[in-house]
Amino acid sequence: MENMGSAKYTELGAFLRSRRERIRPADVGLPTGPRRRVPGLRRDEVAQLAGASVDYYNELERGAGSQPSEQMIAALARALRLTADERDHLYHLADRPVPAHDGAASHVHPGMLDLLQRMPSTPAQVITDLHVPLVQNPLAVALLGDQSGLRGPRASFVYRWFTEAEARQLYPEADHEHQSRAFVADLRAAAARRDAKDTEASSMIASLLDLCPEFAALWARHDVAFRRNDRKRIIHPVIGLIEVNCLNLFSEDGRQRLLWFTPAVGTDSAGLLDLLAVVGDQDISAPAG
């Protein structure tokens, strides 16, 4: 990685510090504590929220050390509750290209991020309208697998559903037909809502039409329906079958969704989700969404 030392990187450190100092611990679910001596968050708290080492974050604020990766910038933007403009500014200061606003490094709607972090006992995640995961809480990682490492078209679970057999291991085979129909109808609704100049959705659809006959046949039906709620049977590799209700909260522009999973009434899923918190994300190798 490149070493940091220019005036722009000094400005990056000052910008991070200014954003850190404006946030109250309660805003990000941290205790205020009786002996807090600094305004806003401490450096170690930002590092914890962003998944960085304290030493590395300290160097960033000093304008020293190595150039932060795009993934680290996205994590810092979430930790510091940056607006979309502030997030883009951070990328510019770090001499990194500003990512597309609907890709895997997209800026997460602050309100959705706040709600996500207020749901520690419920599996929850924020995704784009193309089913690209943006952020997951620990229980969502435990239930669905870690989805943070995928880039390009494969970042979309819909794309993987129709192109990779492993993605379908998330649901029982008897549910695959329903899931396929629902994914295609939802994708059609999301694509139509986007700007006519948008290429992300159109290129993904064109690729799926070329690669997957099943997708092409379903697309030709012109079914359209956003996935606002659904009852799902999810196969966990350690716990087994868990039946849940999947609920969605949409952002105003429809580009992002907060998904959370609650135990289905009349099943033993409540106890299984409690067990999930103990088991964690061990042995999960097939990311899903």
Image: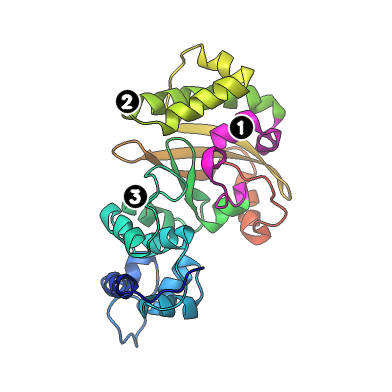
Compared across the picture, whether 125 is left or right of 17 comes to right
SS at mark 3 in the image: loop
Q: What colouring method underlies this structural image? A: rainbow
Which residue in the structure is indicated by mark 1?
A: 161
Q: Is residue 114 above or below residue 207?
A: below
Which label's residue is closer to the chain start, 2 or 3? Answer: 3
Q: CA distance from mark 1 to mark 2?
A: 25 Å
Residue found at x 65% / y 27%: 175
Instruction: Relative to 140, say whether 200 is above or below.
Output: above
Percent x, y of residue 227: 45, 30
Tag on residue 148? Answer: none
Q: Amino acid at mark 2?
A: Ala
Which amino acid type is shown beneath numbered disc 1?
Answer: Trp
- Is residue 171 part of the magenta span, yes or no? yes
Does the CB distance between marks 3 and 1 fall below 8 Å? no
Q: Which mark is residue 109?
A: 3
Alpha carbon separation for disc pair 2 and 3: 23 Å
The quadrant in which the C terminus is found is: top right
| Marked residue nearer the N-terminal end (3 or 1) | 3
Instruction: Inspect this view and state whether residue 47 appears.
Output: yes
Of the pair 6 and 179, the residue shown nearer to us: 6
| Residue 178 visible in rendering | no
User: Where does residue 171 sit, x and y in percent of width and height?
Assistant: 66, 34
Is mark 1 in CB contact (under 8 Å) with mark 2?
no
Indicate the amino acid at tag 3.
His
2 or 80, which lies in front? 2
Stretch in magenta: 143-172
Quarter holding residue 200:
top left
Q: Position of residue 112 (x, y in %)?
A: 36, 50
Which residue occupies 28% across, 56% down?
83
103 or 94, which is in the foreground? 94
The residue carrying pointer 2 sits among few (fewer than 14), some (14 to 19) or many (20 or more) residues within 10 Å by Cα, namely few
